[in-house]
Amino acid sequence: MTDPKPWTIGDSTPGEQRHAPATMRNRDAIVDILRDILPDQGTVLEIASGTGEHIVYFGLKFPDLTFQPSDPDPACCQSIAAWTKREAVTNVLPPLPLDAQAKRWNLPKPAAILCINMVHISPWESSIGLFEKAADLLDSGAPLYLYGPYLRADVETAPGNLAFERSLKSRDLRWGLRDVADMDALAERTGFARESLTEMPANNISLVYRKQP
């Protein structure tokens, strides 16, 4: 079985399996965070699953949980299904074509929601939609986990992240790195509170929010 070629944002090259090289660098660090925040049982919903490599790996690491991948891009959904089959994981469900900006998500309540590397590669309205629908779906105390590069007023932005920001803006002016303060404000408006901020590989961070009573 041959390995899929690396895939980057905006690459429309046909192919069933897509491979995001960064996944190999950050997946274990993310798992370390998830071990502390995920419940012992239930369904974990991932928004913007992309290639599907993360959620398939999580399925292998957390066999007692059920994982529900999703992505609005049909090619990504195809890749998610291909990775699920390739790794023979039985606790990863078929992907759903969910869009963060949709009016509603018609699905059962998840025990947790994950969103990795979506916030900066989408309009701000997608982040609003993510938090609003997470607020509708999650029970009090349930986690909403975000991962990616963010800006912070009290932390100098790494040169690599500044270059990435320019690259994102060149593709779509609505994209770009978000400020943690703005994410916290959005969380508060939608009934969440930030529980933690953790430094991650390659100048990324993990943000854990909890649904408030």
Image (cartoon, rainbow, N blue to C red):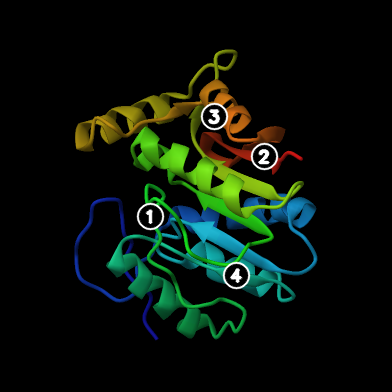
Residue occupied by mark 2: 209
Q: Residue at the location (66% across, 56% down)?
A: 112
* Type of amino acid at the residue the image marks with label 3: Leu
Q: Could you give the CA–CA distance between mark 1 and mark 4, rounded to whole angstroms?
A: 17 Å
Image x and y of residue 50, in percent: 40, 60
Q: Residue at the location (67% across, 57% down)?
A: 31
Residue occupied by mark 4: 67
Q: Which mark is residue 208?
A: none
SS at badge 1: loop
Q: Residue at the location (76% across, 40% down)?
A: 213
SS at badge 2: strand
Q: Could you give the CA–CA distance between mark 2 and mark 3, rounded to whole angstroms?
A: 11 Å
Image x and y of residue 210, in percent: 71, 41
Which of pointers 1 and 4 indicates the residue nearer the eye?
A: 1
* Type of amino acid at the residue the image marks with label 2: Tyr
Please tell me which of labels 2 and 3 falls first in the chain: 3
For residue 87, above or below residue 201: below
Residue 126 lies left or right of residue 30; in this view the side is left
Image x and y of residue 180, in percent: 55, 26
* Type of amino acid at the residue the image marks with label 4: Phe
In depth, the one of 3 and 67 nearer the eye is: 67
